[in-house]
Image (cartoon, rainbow, N blue to C red):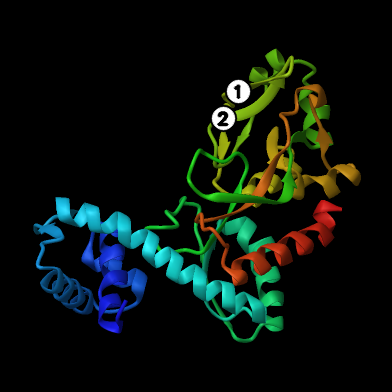
Amino acid sequence: MSGQGWEGLDEFVAVAECGSFLRAAERLRVSSSHVSRQVARLEERLQARLFYRTTRRVSLTEAGQTFFSRCQRLIEERDEAFLAVSDLHGTPKGLLRMTAAVAYGERFIVPLVNEFMAQHPQLRVEIELSNRPLDLVQEGYDLAIRLGRLSESSMVATRIAPRALYLCASPSYLQRYGRPHTLSELSRHNCLIGTSDTWMLQVEGREQPFKPSGNWRCNSGQAVLDAALNGLGLCQLPDYYVLELLRRGLLVSLLEDNRPPDSAVWAVYPQRRYPLPKVRLLIDSLKQGLALRQEYS
């Protein structure tokens, strides 16, 4: 394909995937006028209209849909050809955009990314810490760190750390209100509610949701932990918050037989025939770094 033949393909695919010239421009880090100009030139060369444009939305024409399916494969194979060669050098470079949950990202992921950056100065990284599950393809992310069970998707997921949930309370709370020995007793206790309205427990090998109720709620795991340590109620938190406190006797694990099956911390990235070398190397580094953390020891 001639050099001119490639012009406009990336812009066209970005608009088709994002459904918007503005979002496509944001993903490609160019102006929306540049994207519009490139798509218009492409339509002129093809002598075909690729998009229906209205003030509210952009959608593919029949010709656009046919061209889109071919272009996606073409661009993917082009990018993978470059990756196959760059991987021989083994040096991560360019921009890597990633996202993680706020608290977990601040505490675990960002410090490890910083160590990785110190070893690979040719790499640029942008990290979006958000508790909103971002769309990696539409919003142009190379990697996401996700916690717990994953919903069905077309993404590739690699397990980078374990994740177990513990039902806990402080000794002072249990001394005052007693210790629950069965699930039916939980409803008589004050529950400290975090980001989820539902706690997962296990009954006879099957997961069973429990709807906690109480007089305290905050969307921060650290805040839930602080409330539990102050004897305000029961909490359900991941292992990395509570294991050391359980060892020191500052918290007590409850209903061990009903603890839900372990899940995981996942590195998730868009499906490709060959993963980006910089993404693969960062995932390996995160996995090794998390394994050395005291919280996972």
Q: Nearer the viewer, residue 18 or 11?
A: 11
**Residue at image coords 11%, 73%:** 44
Mark closer to the chain start, 2 or 1 = 2
Q: Is residue 123 above or below residue 265?
A: below
Q: Position of residue 22 (x, y in %)?
A: 24, 68
Please, is residue 119 above or below residue 141 in the view?
Answer: below
- The CA distance from mark 2 to mark 1 is 6 Å
Report whether 169 appears left or right of 133: right
Which of the 4 image quadrants contains residue 256? top right
Q: Amino acid at mark 1?
A: Phe
- Asked whether residue 110 is in view, the answer is yes
Please provide percent x and percent y for residue 100: 56, 58
Most distant residue in the bottom direction? 121
Q: Quadrant of the N terminus?
A: bottom left
Q: Secondary structure at mark 2?
A: loop
Label 2 is placed on what type of residue? Answer: Thr
Q: Are marks 2 and 1 in contact (CB under 8 Å)?
A: yes
Residue named by callout 1: 210
Is the residue 65 above or below the residue 128 in the image? above
Mark identifier at residue 198:
2
Q: Position of residue 11 (x, y in %)?
A: 28, 70
Q: Is residue 230 visible?
A: no
Q: Could you tell me which residue is drawn at 15 percent across and 60 percent down?
A: 50
Tell me the quarter of the picture where residue 165 sits. top right
- Residue extending farthest right: 248
Write the residue at 76% across / 24% down.
177
Comparing 228 with 162, the one in front is 162
Q: Where residue 281 sits in the image (x, y, percent)?
A: 67, 69
273 and 141: which is toward the camera: 273
Please indicate whether residue 297 sits to the left or right of residue 2 in the image: right
Q: Within 10 angstroms of label 2, few (less than 14), some, or many (20 or more) residues? A: some
